[in-house]
Image: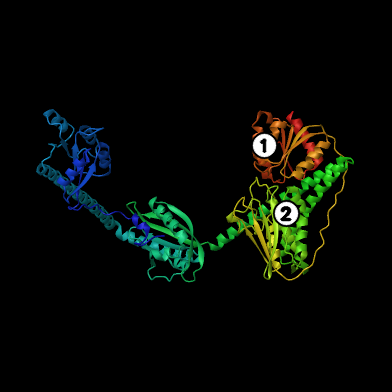
Amino acid sequence: MPTDNTSPITALRPAAVEYYSDNIPVNILIVDDEPKNLTVLESLLNDPSYRLVRAESANQALLALVVEEFALLILDIRMPGMTGFELAQMIKERKKTSLVPIIFLTAYYSDDLHVLEGYDTGAVDYLHKPVNPVILRSKVAVFAEMHRKNRLCDRSNRALLAEVTQRCRVEEQLRELNDTLERRVTERTEALREIDERMRLATEATGVGIWQWNVITNQVRWDAQMFRIYGITPTPDGIVQYSDWSGSVLPEDLAEQEQVLQDTVTRCGSSRREYRIQRRDNRECHNIESVETIRRNAQGEVEWVVGTNLVVTERKQWEQAQQDADRRRDEFLALLAHELRNPLAPIRNSLELMKLARGNADQIERARAIIERQVIQMVRLVDDLLDVSRIARDRLELRQERVELALIVQQAVEVCHPHCEHAGHEITLALPPEPIFLHADPTRLVQVFGNLLTNACKFTQPGGCICLTVERQGHEVAITVKDTGIGIAPEMLSKVFDLFTQIDSSLERTKGGLGIGLSLAKRLSELHGGTVTAHSEGPDRGSEFVVRLPIMEEIPQPAPPTLGASTLGAPTPTTPRRILVVDDNQDAAATLAMLLDLGNHQTRMAHDGLEAVQQAEAFRPAVILLDIGLPKMNGYDACRAIREQPWGQDIVIIALTGWGKEEDRRKSKAAGFDGHMVKPVDYPAFMKLLATLQTAKV
């Protein structure tokens, strides 16, 4: 906004005419490679009207001449590196220093030839060491006085020129005004009356406030709407001070807004900006959209800055809410599709495996166990979604009873045991010797602790440790789940319980999940009158979640039923091929590889992008079934790396992934994939696509 005398924009005003006072010391440069000689010269020329600048070499002297203006240069001739004659020659060749008088001092050069050489280089005098103080002071005084007079003459000339220029400008302006004054006044008065009326109606209808700043007088005027926007009592003439605006802008926005406005005036342009204010009357905060432009006077100079202010608080809130809603919806739907397809892939592969196993009990049992694990995971995912929906609509009812906490904890550990065993984790329990009873819904508490344990298992590297500790603390019990996993960054600690929040959201993320489990655990704990808190010392330092519940009393809950498996029909005959299966879901990779093995294909597996590239080079497969969301290197980059190799040009590479939007298919094609199939893959359709792609490659 425009400013008064306290504003940083005051610097934009024209500078005053430069002024030199007669008592300003005259600069004299003394050059000698002997410091003691410089000291002698300083003592001889000790005068408050002189400012002596020392230089102990030609280079120092040149630097001083670049930086400052000197009335006189007293120069020793004999110096190492560059003689006084050479330095004088350089000084006279430069336009800026060519007129600086030079007095040579020397103890060695006394014959006429050297004296003439000194004068040839531009010297005005030539003195021998030891110097006669009276003569030196006299000569210096002459040149100093000449410099003062020249300086005063320059000042007078500039002042006179400025005065003449200003007088001519004023006379020209007066002539123009006298020629057209009456006509212009009449036309301008009528135009302004019409403009003011239109502007008044427009600002009242739209809520737009108008301000004007005269850059020359530094005066600022607001219309009535501006005063209403800022909650300030209007002034009779509409004139405001800088503090009326700056005192309303939030401090964290003020400096940037002043800089934007200053840039607008400096570059003679226009700008659009947004900032936040706090109204003076009720301290409400609002978002302001400001648009301003400059207006020039008859001489082409910037005279006015004219701008508008509009309150856009509701619009900003609506836009942000829409963006957040759209982003969260899209992320949720994409993640939901991905997470549902992940367990479906190994289930479908296991069913195909059971069709082709032909009575092989070991393979059928392996397939059944995989189906059981994945179905439990899907049921858990769907149940969590339903529970979150019920809690959001306040439809979830707790069936509370008297239960013993130790039994609840043991059930939760049993639920998560397959996941931990599969990942090679060690779970340790530390329970108090005396029983602790709670008044709670046992199923929901198992869900709380199970979600925390599942989360710990998911984000802990294979072979890690998970510790569940129960400790009585007065009328509360603290249940702590601590792991040695990837930890939580400080900025994420406050967000881990938000719905659909994931610690790792990159394409290369190694863990899945919708970001529901922790949010659900927190809400269920709160429904029981408890709390959940998260702690971590940072990435790769492990995590700790603490549930605190009021101690009352409770009773055990039966374990959840296990799920069985079914068998399906006959295999589809295929031509044997060398196939590399790449998926970070080991069950999905294993079941698909087993299916392919039963079809007489020769298979290998890889579980991350880097391993996929290495296995492809070593195995030289005819076909690669490549997941996209892989750790270490995502599927897109892995495919590109393979295609860059001579041996990877003719390999059929098919994307098998949970990501199935059209954009995902375009990305996979651009990365070099021959086909794109979404999990869970229909096995006959997959084999048909494989045959088609191989035929096209021949």
Q: Is residue 617 above or below residue 1?
A: above
Marks 2/1: CA distance? 38 Å
* CB contact under 8 Å: marks 2 and 1: no
Query: As shown in the figure, which amino acid type bears the numbered disc 1?
Result: Cys
Q: Residues within 10 Å of mark 1 (few under 14, many from 20)?
A: many
Lateral position of residue 105 relative to residue 448, left or right = left
Q: Quadrant of residue 575?
A: top right
Quarter of the image containing the N terminus? bottom left
Q: Which residue is mark 1?
A: 639
Per the rendering, the mark at residue 675 is none
Q: Is residue 165 above or below residue 244?
A: above
Image x and y of residue 488, in percent: 62, 54
Tell me the SS state at disc 2: strand
Per the rendering, the mark at residue 427 is 2
Residue that sits furthest to the right in the current view: 359
Image x and y of residue 162, in percent: 23, 51
